[in-house]
Amino acid sequence: MKNTIGRRIFDREVKRIRKTVIFLLGVAAVMVMFVFGLGKENPKATIKVTVSHLSKEEQDAASVPEANKKDLRKLEVSVRIDDSKSATDRKIELPYLSTVIKQFDQSRVISTSSFEQNNVGSEPFAISEQSVIFDARGLDEEAIRRMFETSYAVVSWTSKDNAKTYDRFSIGNLLHVQQEP
């Protein structure tokens, strides 16, 4: 009888120790994943460059003669850096699209707009967007590409361990022309 009671106590202790060891191994595995990068952010940049025809609302808002509205195009550049909340520094630089077009021809730009959101440390993303509505008369897709081939979107960030990442992308090379609806 004494032997069976001792055996039961011993078995309970072995089970308790086994559960503790399994728990500690699980905690150690999670810590190893974070130390070796499985828990680290891997920021990525996404760039979208589109030339499109104007929507009906945009055509109505454009202050040009009705006959010229069919010649208007909208160039939109959108840059995002995602998965970068822990970055200590994060920048998106876009050229002034209207300035690039005005270097080609002063009278082509109709209107511009821009938006930027970059709250370093409090949000996991940064956004920078610019658009310009311009008169594309006489310009084919290749001419628009050439106009922007030496204009660059630049993205950079610095991680907490002070590793710096920098890259630039040609707007002309990334340009996608949407066909008329």
Image (cartoon, rainbow, N blue to C red):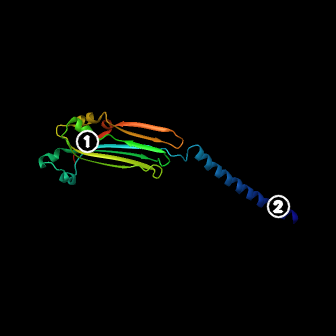
Amino acid type, label 1: Ser
Identify the residue under disc 1.
Answer: 98
Q: Secondary structure at mark 2?
A: helix
Give the percent coordinates (x, y) of residue 41. Answer: 50, 46
Label placed on residue 109: none
Q: Nearer the viewer, mark 1 or mark 2?
A: 1
Give the percent coordinates (x, y) of residue 72. Answer: 19, 45
Give the alpha-carbon distance from disc 1 to disc 2, as whole Å: 85 Å
Residue drawn at x 72%, y 55% is 18
Placement of 4 over or under 136, stated as above or below:
below
Please state if 80 lies on the left or on the right of 63 as rendered: right
Give the percent coordinates (x, y) of residue 17. Answer: 74, 56
Please state if 108 lies on the left or on the right of 158 as rendered: left
Q: Residues within 10 Å of mark 1 (few under 14, many from 20)?
A: many
Give the percent coordinates (x, y) of residue 178. Answer: 26, 44
Comparing 56 with 131, the one in front is 131
Identify the residue under disc 2.
Answer: 7
Residue drawn at x 61%, y 50% is 30
Q: Earlier in the sequence, mark 1 or mark 2?
A: 2
Q: Secondary structure at mark 1?
A: helix
Whether the residues at callouts 1 and 2 have beta carbons within 8 Å, the answer is no
Please state if 8 lies on the left or on the right of 43 as rendered: right
- Specify the quadrant that holds the N terminus: bottom right
